[in-house]
Image: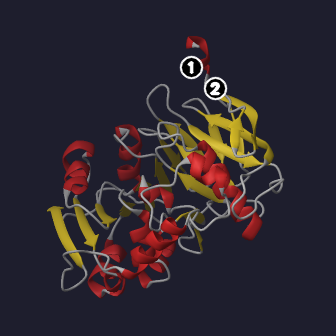
Amino acid sequence: MILRLWVALLALLMPLAAHATPDGYTRYFIGDRAAPTPGKRAPGLLLSGGGDWDLGAFRWFTAKAGHGHIVLLRASQGPELGEEFMNVVGGVASVETFVFDDRKAAYDPRILSALEKADGVFLAGGDQSRYVRFWQATPLSALIDRLAKDRPIGGTSAGLAIMGWNGYGAFGDDGITTPEALANPVGPAVTVVGDFLHLPHMQRIFTDSHFMIRNRMGRLIAFLAKVRMTGSRTVVGLGVDEKASLVVEADGMARLMAPAGTYAWLVEPSGLPAKAQLGEPLDYPAVRITGIGPGSAIDLRRLKVSGAAFSGVAKVSGGVLTGVPVPPAQSITR
């Protein structure tokens, strides 16, 4: 635990980029900036769980952007995702990518102007702790909130992780595991972050990505326990599997676009945890889990699922999670 605290402290004090650029970012561009936006843009959210993109979901996003101009934001790597939007997803006029390496870039008028002109904004994967450090409480985060009123906002992996009103900060950690989080749910390694983005219909949502393939159910329950003990007592979890995407319409109705065997998971603890103390394992007697499949729909305003793929009530006792419902296809093979 002491080592983890020192790692977190050093991460905050160390320079955030080994090769900082003079303006705090690198820009990449592909497409035709002068091309008119062919269609009418409309609001919506793309919540992608990471890994390979579901092309149907991403084409839904580009259609919401009027097949126009996309701005992609990230804090690592380069132009690869912009090229994928242009050449694989297709149907866009241009993609402009900004790769941040310093917080000052979130105040840069050139980036803010590009966002204002964009027909859609996409938050790439990477390390969400850098997004929190670079973007939280800046003109850029405030602008994303405002743009969400009339154009689509999307995110994948780390980008998805910051789209709820509460999220995992991942400070000084490569990604806390379920056993670690359940063993000390209110400890300093469970770095939950609030008051960052304020996207429509996401007020009570805590998002997590790469969900079941990385065994993240338990850690999401631990995140919810900490938030409920220290902040919002009605927050719920929304985990999205790799390759899966939830597409959210302007009215808050969402559906899953995903290959067979992948889901989104609505995680709703009952009340406060029975025990969530510093240095002690979590006890949470009842956590309702609802599976959202391709035939389901979820109303994010009311947090109601119709056509659920499966559901059940799990529990955490002494830091051990049991009773997680099994999707039907998996239950047949067991």
Q: Mark 2 packing: few (<14 Cα in 10 Å), some, or many (20+)?
A: some
Percent of width and height locating residue 51: 36, 42
What residue is shown with label 2? Answer: 326
Q: Which residue is mark 1?
A: 330
Q: How many marks?
A: 2
Closer-to-camera residue (233/69): 233
**From where the camera sits, is residue 149 visible?**
no
Q: Is residue 307 above or below residue 207?
A: above
What type is the residue that disc 1 sits on?
Answer: Gln
Q: Residue at x 31, y 68 (%)?
A: 75
Q: Quadrant of residue 1?
A: bottom right
CB-based contact (under 8 Å), mark 2 and mark 1: yes
The structure residue drawn at horizontal position 71% and vertical position 65%, both measured from the top left corner, is 278
Is 158 placed left or right of 75 in the picture? right
Secondary structure of the residue carrying numbered label 1:
helix
Query: Viewer-proximal residue, 124 or 96?
Result: 124
Q: CA distance from mark 2 to mark 1?
A: 6 Å
Quadrant that contains the C terminus: top right
Can you give x and y, in whole percent of width and height, for residue 13 in the image?
Answer: 39, 82
